[in-house]
Image (cartoon, rainbow, N blue to C red):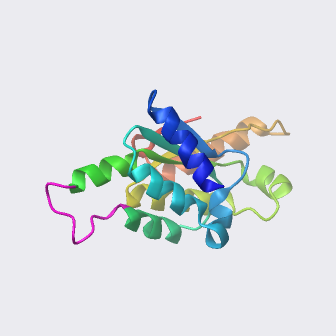
Amino acid sequence: NMDDYFNEVEQLLKQHPVYLCISYDTDLLAVEGRFGFVRKWLEFAKLHQDLTLEIRTKSGNPEIFKELAKLYEPAETDSACEISNAAYMQAMRRIIFAWTVSPEAVASATEHGAPSPHLRLQALKAAKEAGFSVRLCFDPMIYHSGWKNSYFELVKSAFNIIKPADLYDVS
C-alpha cells in the first residue's frame, strides 16, 4: 500500500513541510534487496522539496549507498534549467540515514544477526561520502557493568571514523 502512504504524505505536504521517520521500528535497509521500499521513498522524496525522510538502520553495507545515490544523479536528458546539480544535492541532504550503535559487548549480547558497530560506522561513512545526511544514535543506552567506559570507547571509536562536523546530529 505504498500509494496510500504517498497519497497521505502529499495531503500533509499541502498543509506544511513534513519530517517523516519511515524506518524507526524496523530496518528497511535490511530488507531493501527484497522489497525496495527505501528506493521508492527516495524517489518520492526527490519530487517533494518540503519532505525530509529519516531512515533508521543498523546497516553494515556501504555499497548500498552508492546505488541509492544514483537516484539523485541528474539524468543526461535534464537540462540545466530543469534540475541543477545543486538541486539534486539539496534533495539528498533531506534524506537522513540514522545509525543505531551500541558498545561491542552490548551489540554482541543483544543484537544477534546485526552487523557489528564497526561495520555500521563504515556504512555511515559511506552514506555521508555518497552525499546523504547522516545521524549517529547512541540510543538506547543500556546499563551494564562498565557502561561508562564502554560508551566512552564507542564514542571515541565513532569519532575516529567520522568527524562530528560531518554528522547531521547525534542522539
Magenta segment: does it hold 75? yes
The part of the image, by quadrant, that contains residue 123 is bottom right
Q: Residue 69: where, in percent of width, then height?
A: 41, 63
Residue under the point 52% across and 62% down = 39
Residue under the point 77% across and 54% down = 107
Left-right relation of 108 to 158: right
Residue under the point 36% across and 61% down = 72
Residue under the point 30% across and 54% down = 88
**Residue 74 vs residue 29, the one in the foreground:** 74
Magenta segment: does it hold 74? yes
Vertically, is 44 above or below 50?
below
Residue 118 in view, yes or no? no
Residue 41 in view, yes or no? yes
**Residue 133 vs residue 145, the one in the foreground:** 133
Left-right relation of 19 to 26: left
Left-right relation of 67 to 34: left
Q: Quadrant of the C terminus?
A: top right
Q: Residue 100: where, in percent of width, then height?
A: 65, 47
> Magenta region: which residues?
72-82
